[in-house]
Image (cartoon, grey):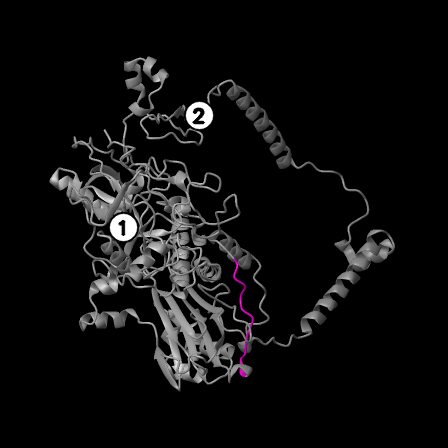
Amino acid sequence: MENNNPETKIYSAGYADTFHGSSDISTEYSCFYEKEPDGTVGASNLYVLASGIKGTSVPEVTARFTAKKILYEYFHSYDYVDASRLALAMRTVNNEICNYAKVQSDNLGSTAIAASVTDGKVTIATVGRAKAYIIRNGKVFQITEDPAVVEEKIQAGEMTPEEAYGEGGDSAAFPTALGKERDITTDVYDGIEVRGGDILLVCSASLETFIGKKEILEAASDSSPRTITQKLLNSPSLQNANVPASAAAIRIYDESMVDNMIRVDGDTPEDTDLNLERKEVELIRKNKPRKPGNEPGGKKKKKSNLPRIILLVLLFLALLAGGVWAAARYGIIPAEVREKYLGNLIPSTETPTPTIDWVRESMTVYEATMDVQKAAAVAATVNAWPTQTPYPTFTPVFIDLEEKTEAPTATAVVVPEVSGSADMETDADTDADPEQTAEDEGPTSTPFPTLPPEPETPEVVVKDDYVDERSGAEMVYIPAGNFVLGSNPEEDYYADSEEESPQMRVYLDGYWMGKTEVTNAQYLRCVEAGVCDQGYYMALYMPGLEDYPVTYVTVEQAERFCSWIGGHLPSEYQWEKAARGTDGRIYPWGSEEPDYDNNLANIPNYVNEDGEGNDLFAAGSFPEGASPYGLLDMAGNVWEWTSTWYSANYYKTLDAEQELSGSIVRNPTGPENGSSRVIRGGSCAPTEINYFAAYMRTAARSYLNMASSYYVGFRCMVPDTGDAAGPEGAGNPMNLPGGPDEPVPAPLP
């Protein structure tokens, strides 16, 4: 939908609300925030609807968290593109729900739809079945596509199952909820241009069931977004069904209509988490306000005064009876009058003879006897108490790290002693009686299989590193041989046993890999050569950013650059070997986690000693975090594209292939197709503040469901074809760590 006059300023104002149904706390939640003030264009307005999945543990909590968190993450994103900001916000929400559900062993899930309006353009991101419409010139146009439409397109041949649902093409496996699994798909509708007089309408799935074109047009006839929203939520069919539902209405204004713009205060974006929302819901339930009345319309009934009159009469009679009783009881009334008129109603003032309650006396003796018996039992038990704690104890030992390529700088790790472990043998174990030890030890088990012995490999051949004459990129040689792929959850705290296991050895041919991520200056050379395309948001000509990683680059643009220098995007396996070497280390530099003091990687909110940071750094700014081959920024700064299609459980396919063939897998290429490419290495994005230690591991795998992002770049690999002259375009050899003057680490024994 094009804007006929691009110079016309476009404004927006809206409102979002929720009908709770019969409950005070709904399984749906809505919020919105309008950053665009009156008279200013360019700032963003965001409207979010979220629905907790019925049948999950706390749908009210997940709905509140989802909506609030998306609102907060969007307005605190450093990305410049609305589509990226919305997709990253959805991804953050999904990961937090997944992690919380895993820790709490809860079944959690929610759906969401978010619509942003920025400078006359609408972007919509949705997970689930919520709908978005535009009302223009008395007609209703649906923006989002529901699953039924997608199925129709597949049946008509307009779309392949792979295009619709990713690898496998199975709609049943298509994830439609946040928090159910890490591999989710966010549908993003970007660049929708609007003009003055348009109305953008966003509806939750439950509301869409009860309204149609007629109800939408009737509601849209009002000038106030708030009234439009409330009319939709007051739909008689929805009220009768008593089902929770949410809606948001946004009116679009141009300069001629801005005087009639109606704004309503929205919700201030505030950070939250699931624990906070859980407590908030509990507090609301405990302090539920009393309703004024249950009558239609909420009107109170006029109360009768009869109960109050009856109460006063009874109180007067009680006081009168009490006065007569007291007067007779204490002799104010003569005895003859009392006996004649009151009889035995008033007791005598004489003190009665005390009586003995034999039942109470018997119980007292019984209780005393029981106390004596209990005291005797306790005294007899004290001497029988064991002198050792009844809980199992473990003797701590230190892990032998001599076989590692470098020792960790942090305090040595202390782990429980495991019977039968040769790697953790202590002097006490050596001196112990073998027969006695065998009796004490129970059956041993290994929850995660250990790597099989590595077969002998030819002598490592190291070739010269070089500088590519066309781009100026420094290329480092990665020799042929085996390396450890994946994670072992027993050694890596952040290991994802689903996506990164089983751990195995894989063989790769030799290749060259970029020492750093491709920079703006290097990519600009390709643009000026007429080979590469310049993306709209790339900072190729900005002074001072020449050595920064090029971002907002698509997979296709990255592959074109790599082809220009004679190579390709690396597979995720080539990337992992270049990052960790052959010893299976957790991070490129070893096992120490990156933080704000060790200067190993550019992590979220990092600031150096000179006060620089809180964003990207120039490529190669963290030499202390180099990989075993001397490659820089393999963790942090920006994520890096690979050529591999993402599949969560592909390592299990590799393991089955290895078991079937009986030999190590050689040069894996990954799945043949998919919906997203694998990205590696983590980034300094503020949205990753809680997860960067996991994302920056050499074995961590992720994906991007957008074409490009401010926090995604790339580096290239050039295959070793065996040509003695070296790669085409190679300049003079470099004296780099891992180059000809310094040998690379040897393969695992």
Q: Secondary structure at mark 1?
A: loop
Which residue is nearer to you in this view: 24 or 499?
499
User: What residue is shown at x 65% (from left), y 74% (from top)?
Assistant: 303
Magenta region, residue range: 260-270
List x then y, in percent, for residue 545: 42, 55
456 lies above or below 381: below
Q: CA distance from mark 2 to mark 1?
A: 71 Å
The residue tagged 1 is 469
List x then y, in percent, for residue 489: 32, 38
Do labels 2 and 1 touch, CB within 8 Å?
no
> Predominant secondary structure in magenta?
loop
Q: Is residue 734 magenta?
A: no
Q: Earlier in the sequence, mark 2 or mark 1?
A: 2
Compared across the picture, whether 109 is left or right of 297 comes to left
Compared across the picture, whether 447 is left or right of 417 comes to left
In the drawing, what numbered circle is on residue 390? 2
